[in-house]
Image (spheres, rainbow, N blue to C red):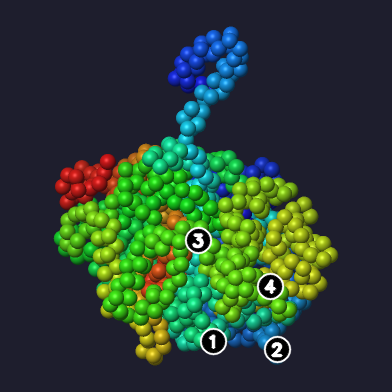
Amino acid sequence: MTNTWQDIKNANVVLVMGGNAAEAHPCGFKWVIEAKIENKAKLVVVDPRFTRTASVADVYAPIRPGTDIAFLSGVMRYLLENDSLQHDYVRSYTNASFIVRDGFAFEDGLFTGYDAEKHSYDKSSWDYELDEHGFAKTDDSWQNPRCVINLLRQHVDRYTPEMVSRICGTPKDKYLEICALIASTSKPNKALTSLFALGWTQHSVGAQNVRSMAMVQLLLGNIGVAGGGMNALRGHSNIQGLTDVGLLSSAMPGYMSLPKDSEVTFDKYMESRQFKPLRPNQTSYWQNYRKFFVSFQKAIYGSAAAVENNWAYDWLPKLDVPDYDILRAFEMMDNGQMNGYICQGFNPMQAFPDRGKIRRSLAKLKYLVVMDPLDTETANFWQDYGPQNPSDPSGTQTEVFQLPTTCFAEESGSLVNSARWLQWHWKAVNPPGEAKSDIFIMTGLYRRLKALYAKEGGAFPDPLLNLTWDYTNPDEPDPSELAKEMNGRALQEVKDPTGAVLLRAGQQLDGFAQLRDDGTTLSGCWIFSGCYTEKGNQMARRDASDPRNAGIAPNWAFAWPANRRILYNRASADLNGKAWNPEKPVIEWNGSRWVGVDVPDYGPTVNPQDSVGPFIMNAEGTARLFARAALAEGPFPEHYEPFESPSENLLHPKVRSNPAARVFAKDRDAMGVAADFPYVGTTYRLTEHFHYWTKHSLINAILQPQEFIEIGEALAREKNIEQGGWVKVSSKRGEVICKAFVTKRIKPMMVDNKPTHVIGCPIHWGFTGLAHKGYGANTLTPFVGDANTNTPEFKAFLLNIERVRQPSAADLAQGPRNARGSERNRS
Amino acid sequence: MDLSRRGFIKLTGAGLAASTMGALGFGLAGAALAASVRPFKLSAATETRNTCTYCSVACGILIYSQGDRAKNVHASVLHIEGDPDHPVNRGTLCPKGAGLLDIVRAPGRLTMPKYRAAGSREFKQVSWDFALDRIAQLMKQDRDANFIARNAAGTAVNRWTSTGMLAASASSTETSYVTWKVARSLGMVVFDNQARV
């Protein structure tokens, strides 16, 4: 989230599209209701299903799964056509006036530079024209036809209301009503907030879905302001934190990235990360990358990281592919290229697409380690649970370790919420039995491996042998000590050029501005710096006071970066530093500095006259309507059909789906076609369940006890399916036999004049836990991901459905088929 | 006053005693007793501030546990409710958060390390030392056999692709930092968390 949960109350229009906050984030959604009641806000919901969020909306419109870019590109066309832009914002705070290089073009569904064999682009033409100083050329008058704004106008021109309606199945009148409501927030003192979640990310065009909305928000001047922003309502309690700390294949803490094979030296690595400003006077804050990097290497390798060995640059693994993401991992496993896999609080058997492939792949491992508080399907993948998990134990050679871990009530530490707040929590009780913390287990493995390498030697042990581990309890480091290490401290006395002491040796840093690239400071995660200072644990702060009732609560816990609650908040003020919305100022220029309810996302004393852009992380100083080479499939979003779709691509039939997506050959063969699987499937969550955990929780297992799919009345009539009757739902990859819930919430949509039915598949079931035994919706889903992130396309795929008889008692019985009495630990 | 039947009976008995005491000059005892009855369940419990383990709204919660953290007391969670001081949830919880007690005490909670040998039809309980020793051996065997120190061009790449890891997105940030340090110092690149899906 750019903003906070409470800040939603400041919005004039709330758009929930790509999510269902009322059911998935109920206690955050109360701030939408607050906006409606206190701020007379209008709630707009666009969703394939009439959700509980839709039930309290002012306007609801249905949309076919996987067509959001067409809808939002149409919105951009509407804004440009009707001149509903916040002109001063667009002109000064975005790259609308930047001139794009000759040679860049878009034709028949492809941008310049496509290589059909590699399914990827040569992106060299996706850039600005530069002047002799290396600065981007601009035309503030927007007369140059190569200005970003003019290219955008041309690009979205094809998305007429008629075309949007044909592609999305959204009725034209509803669509135009929504366009008008969105456009109403182009006034400088009006804001729209975008609340989204997996409904946008779980597509082969997921990143571009989000980007499309960000562009809409920029045209409206809604980024950085109170009640505005792009607000990703994230899933797990610390999914933000794990992303921040870089637990993703190519990531490092604080959004730094691991080197690639081509970056053979540290200097070469730094070359592409120097972020030289692209316009005069710009901050381009990533210019400090070297400070963050060196301080990080000092945190993890201590004195072994020195200027002589380029701060142990070569000790970091380098990547020969963009990412070893989960789809690539299971493809490698299926091909026999992996031997071991460790699942820490993660249940891939249910959570990943194409369960058949996941089960088959796990069985090819030599060893599988599962660390979890609960008995998961992954730990039991080798057992024969009947049709829900048809495995052959004696034929499965994988050694499996099931390690019991603590849950939230049994450990202390911080969690980062959607709004980037690091909140400390405290241990209440000891874990059950012999369960241990993940910190104990990771430490146990580290210390054993270190001892083995020290004794026996082996493949390149240096990073392992030199890893810093100076914790009071080396067997289970205290979370406070780890938090202090992430915050960072001075390793020796740090002086300014006059010799005055800035930091004494060992002093905890106040923030990342104190980091150095000479090895005198360390920080395990620079963006968290300020979370645990000399003043103590800032994440444990519990002062809920909220000046002017702004929805900021600046002294509650700690928000990264620098306790800033609204990102890009410089953009909440005009060129002279006055708030666009005088009733809800965030920060303003008082003649000598920036002041307000939030920490400025800007130099605190930078004069507005100095033309320093508000988007300080970008080399341009502006936000980007044209993304240059940042994304895989183009600098502008384009509508591509899901990989399994009932429809042709009406805009360019020859390029139907994302041309830059990576699809492995076997998975391409496992894609179905509409002739065999005529209905659109989409997966989602229920308000009573959290993923695959709460089927272990008695109250939740009672509330939603059994696997089902949701279909509209028209499809039920057509297929002779009764309310509560048994059905078989199938994709090319597998089938699920479960109950049907016939509902008015899903109605057929007219897509290019053809009725299109949607089948909703809640995800929560499996073969362990207290709820009835089920398959899990990912039995059905396709093994393809977004071209940038490889987040799987769980939200749009093809299904068939038929009525079946009730399964046999043996197929419905709980427990494994090879169970012999007490071998399963159930009480 | 909101009284349960049991509380009422207790209060009635105490009231009799109190009125006698009132006659002896302890006039406020009755009111004090009445005030003490309502919170009897949680008054002896320890309150701990925590965060809901499910979604990223990160609702503040109060965990009430039996016992006072004395050395010989085995604490157990009695009750969990929303934290009224928390600026986002203001005391509310959703159908998932309201059931937190049942996930802490779920019958599916694991209590002992278990091991399933290749081809076996069952899990066996094992010690932590057995499990961690064996895993460390397997990791080292695989790493030593498949670690890529240099690529074909001779560049130091120091990566290990034949063992991978998925990290837990409901664990603490501090856990994730330890996990990063250990996984990457081994050269692990097949490494993701729930943000990928």
The three-letter code of the residue at mark 1 reads: Asp
Q: Kindly state the secondary structure of the residue where label 3 is placed.
A: helix
User: In the rendered structure, which disc, 4 or 1, sits on the residue that comes first in sequence?
Assistant: 1
Query: Is disc 3 on the same chain as disc 1?
Result: yes
The residue closer to the viewer here, A774 or A754, is A774
Q: Is residue A148 left or right of residue A252?
A: right
- Decide: few, some or many residues near mark 1? Use Cα within 10 Å; few <14, some 14-19, many ≥20: few
Residue underneath mark 1: A267
Disc 4 or disc 2, which is closer to the eye? 4
Marks 2 and 3 in Cβ contact (< 8 Å): no
Mark sitting earlier along the chain (4/2)? 2
Which is in the foreground here, disc 3 or disc 4? Answer: 4
Q: Mark 2 = which residue? A: A133
Residue wearing tag 3? A481
Q: CA distance from mark 4 to mark 2?
A: 38 Å
Percent position of residue A350, x then y = 34, 56
Q: CA distance from mark 2 to mark 3?
A: 47 Å
Secondary structure beneath disc 4?
Answer: strand
Residue B61: image location, x then y, percent: 51, 43
CB of mark 3 within 8 Å of CB of mark 4? no
Q: To which residue does mark 4 refer?
A: A501
The CA distance from mark 3 to mark 4 is 25 Å
Position of the C terminus of chain A, as image quadrant, is: top left
Q: Which is in the foreground here, disc 2 or disc 3?
A: 3
Q: Residue at coordinates 50% horizontally, 47% vertically from top-left?
A: B50
Mark toward the start of the polypeptide (2 vs 3): 2
Report the chain holding disc 4.
Answer: A
Left or right? Give the position of A818 relative to A68.
left
Which quadrant would the N terminus of chain A be assigned to in this image? bottom right
Say which amino acid is labelled 3. Glu
- State the residue at coordinates (45%, 45%): A428
Determine the residue positioned at 82% across, 62% down.
A590
